[in-house]
Structure formats: structure tokens, C-alpha cells
Image (cartoon, helix red, strand yellow):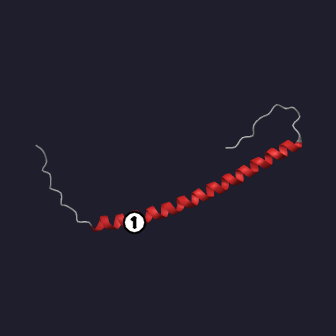
């Protein structure tokens, strides 16, 4: 979260406030672009991994299974 730094109230001018606001908006826009890009990369990775897991599930269903020996109840 971006927080505005508190400055001593020495009568900061409107121009300073506008400049600071502009800088923060620019920073938010850059951060937003970066996050969107990372999100797209993560979506592609999820799709890639999901298809891999689907292939593993198919192979697991086709794999021969060993029969388990029946256990006799302990006396």
C-alpha cells in the first residue's frame, strides 16, 4: 500500500501537492502494469502445469495396480 508521507505543515503549496499526487499516480500505473504482466505470466504457467497434471492423471489411471494382500485380523 502506498502511503503519502506526512510532512510538517509548513504551508505546503498546491503545486507541491499536485506534483506529489502526479508522482504517486505514475507509480501506481507502473506497478499496475508490472502486476498485470506478472499475472499473465502466472496464468500461462498455471495452464502449462494443469495440462501436465492432466497427463499424469491419465497415465495413473492406465497404470497396472498391484493387488493388496488381505490382512487377517490379529487375535
Task: Check the picture and name the quadrant holding the N terminus.
Answer: top right
Count how many numbered circles sit on residues in the image: 1
- Residue 70, given in percent of the width and then of the height, sits at 15, 55
Residue at 75% across / 47% down in the picture? 24
Is residue 8 positioned above or below 44 on the image? Answer: above
- Residue 43, given in percent of the width and then of the height, sits at 53, 61
Is residue 46 positioned above or below 7 on the image? Answer: below
Is 63 on the left or on the right of 30, as rendered?
left
Is 18 on the left or on the right of 58, as rendered?
right
Residue at 75% across / 37% down in the picture? 5
Residue at 52% across / 63% down in the picture? 44
Residue extending farthest left:
75
Of residue 5 and residue 73, the one placed in the foreground of this image is 5
* Residue on which disc 1 sits: 54
Task: Check the picture and name the quadrant holding the C terminus.
Answer: top left
Is 40 on the left or on the right of 57, as rendered?
right
- Residue 16, given in percent of the width and then of the height, sits at 85, 42
Dividing the picture into quadrants, the one containing residue 13 is: top right
- Residue 38, given in percent of the width and then of the height, sits at 58, 56
Dividing the picture into quadrants, the one containing residue 49 is: bottom left
Is residue 38 positioned above or below 11 on the image? Answer: below
What SS does tag 1 mark? Answer: helix
Is 12 on the left or on the right of 45, as rendered?
right
Graded by Cα atoms within 10 Å as few (under 14), some (14 to 19) or many (20 or more), the crowding at tag 1 reads few
Residue at 71% across / 51% down in the picture? 28
Amino acid at each position: 500500500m502506498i502511503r503519502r508521507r506526512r510532512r510538517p505543515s509548513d504551508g505546503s503549496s498546491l503545486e507541491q501537492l499536485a506534483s506529489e499526487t502526479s508522482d504517486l499516480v505514475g507509480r501506481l500505473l507502473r506497478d499496475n502494469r508490472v502486476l498485470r504482466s506478472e499475472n499473465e505470466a502466472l496464468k500461462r504457467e498455471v495452464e502449462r502445469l494443469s495440462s501436465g497434471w492432466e497427463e499424469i492423471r491419465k497415465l495413473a489411471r492406465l497404470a497396472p495396480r498391484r493387488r493388496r494382500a488381505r490382512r487377517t485380523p490379529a487375535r
